[in-house]
Image (tube, rainbow, N blue to C red):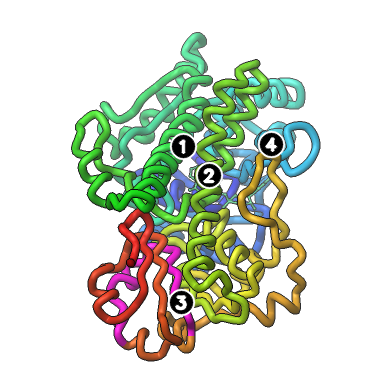
Amino acid sequence: MVKICCIGAGYVGGPTMAVIALKCPDIEVVVVDISSPRIAGWNSDRLPIYEPGLDDVVKQCRGRNLSFSTEVHRHVGDADIVFVSVNTPTKTCGLGAGKAADLTYWESAARMIADVSVSDKIVVEKSTVPVKTAEAIEKILAHNGRGFSYQILSNPEFLAEGTAIRDLLSPDRVLVGGRRDTAAGSAAVDLLAGVYARWVPQDRIITTNLWSAELSKLAANAFLAQRISSVNAVSALCEATGADIAEVAHSVGKDARIGSRFLSASVGFGGSCFQKDILNLVYICECYGLPEVASYWREVIRINDYQKSRFVNRVVSSMFNTVAGKKVAVLGFAFKKDTGDTRETPAIDVCKGLLGDKAVVSIYDPQVAGEQVARDLAMNKFDWDHPRHLQPLEQLSATDLEKQVAVAADAYEAAKDAHAVCILTEWDEFRGLDYRRMFQGMQKPAFVFDGRNVVEVAKLREIGFVVYSIGKPLDD
Ligand code: NAD
């Protein structure tokens, strides 16, 4: 029986391995992590991440051919294929701080593989890594290994949180990069492609050289983020001119060369990947002596920051230029719907902006616990070396936070006695709220600031709300 071991039981490692186990019952799949609470979560009825459909897949496979363990060395040691799906955040100090990928976890995983191997292995880059990382891994394994052979493959993951299981079961493409110039390298590519071919149509499995696969992941995320920044940039112009971003995006997206997906204006993109991967791309361009290309991609992040600050400024200026002492209900804290992930969520910047103007913020998100909100808002944000439009709010003390931030049990509680409601995540439940009931319990004038274009503006105006919706014509 082939044994797969995945190092890293996170948002990528957990779901991807669960789907491989589901589709390949003859393969033993073990997911290992150094975090025992995470592994305990995967072995319980309350999985450590929220992802629609994930519970079902895990329940079907766990105890059959899927297991989760903290015995990292044992399972890595005798696996045939080792996926490395550890975190690769942005470096916060030293060379490349604020841009380069921090490969500390990656490197220690590679060294550990070399130390504990008792057989030859295929080592698969599942994490998003800078182009040429495979070369570094090859060196680490060659210099530290104990005579075993290692084939390195790049198999970047394209799933999106919130739709991970759907994306994994029916991916647009699976990418396997490897060294076709050696027999062992070629066999490794075929073996991994063969695993995916059990359920992915052949024409969706792309094999490339290692560097193309590594770079494709960064490029794909940069393109996706760029699309959001493009539509958000147009949304600002819509508000200035009276055009409606929904109408503009619809008209633009009808062009088959452009397409209609990923054209929703919003308060900005978030998540652990887009910003980090673009910064990584910027750094790589700079390292390869391509400053113009670097500054091109950097603008995508600048517009994203601008969009968040534009939203905060709109809230404050609409509410007579101050929110001091005013209660503002924040609906949604996760970076998108159908996930509890708050990494780099725009809600952090928006809340910090409001708190900086001394608002009292009451937050409700169906999947984000209060402790997580508190952790995120208390966290000092790294001072990126590009200009931030938002003032960092490190000066907020723990007592300020306690006085100014509350976490509500539902949207109505959050909005009770509030002067304004800010919608920051596009959860479906926010579309169906009883806004009339909400209006009755609020201070007047009652404002709605919709950062995701989920409400029906005309209906809310009819109720009596003053409504601002990203990229939509403003109230008179
Ligand atoms: P994550 O932080 O949720 O999970 C990473 C896990 O790796 C953590 O649980 C950590 O404890 C574990 N880990 C770190 N070092 C380890 C070691 N030496 N041994 C064992 N376990 C170790 O991260 P994630 O969101 O799953 O992302 C993982 C990688 O996949 C990143 O490179 C990310 O950029 C990429 N990616 C993420 C997404 C996404 O939507 N989250 C999508 C595609 C690609």
Q: What is the CA distance from the residue labelled 2 to the residue labelled 4?
A: 15 Å
State yes or no: discs 2 and 4 in contact (Cβ < 8 Å).
Answer: no
Mark 4 Cβ inside 8 Å of ligand 1: no
**Residue 41 image offset from top left, x and y in percent:** 55, 66
**Farthest front residue in view:** 476
User: Mark 3 or 1 closer to N-term?
Assistant: 1
- What is the three-letter code of the residue carrying label 4? Leu
Q: What is the CA distance from the residue labelled 2 to the residue labelled 1?
A: 8 Å
Residue 420 marker:
3
State whether residue 163 is above or below residue 146.
below
Mark 2 Cβ inside 8 Å of ligand 1: yes
Q: Secondary structure at mark 4?
A: loop
Q: Residues within 10 Å of mark 2 (few under 14, many from 20)?
A: many
Residue 325 marker:
none
Residue that mark 2 sits on: 273
State whether residue 364 is above or below residue 395.
below
**Residue 147 image offset from top left, x and y in percent:** 70, 22
State yes or no: discs 2 and 3 in contact (Cβ < 8 Å).
Answer: no
Residue 103 marker:
4
Quadrant containing the N terminus is: top left
Going by the image, does 263 lie left or right of 401?
left
Q: Secondary structure at mark 1?
A: helix
Q: Secondary structure at mark 2?
A: loop
* Residue 246 inside the magenta-drawn segment: no
Residue 221 marker:
1
**Residue 233 image offset from top left, x and y in percent:** 42, 43
Of the residues tagged 1 and 4, which is closer to the observer? Answer: 1
User: Mark 4 or 3 closer to N-term?
Assistant: 4
Q: Give the image quarter of residue 192.
A: top left
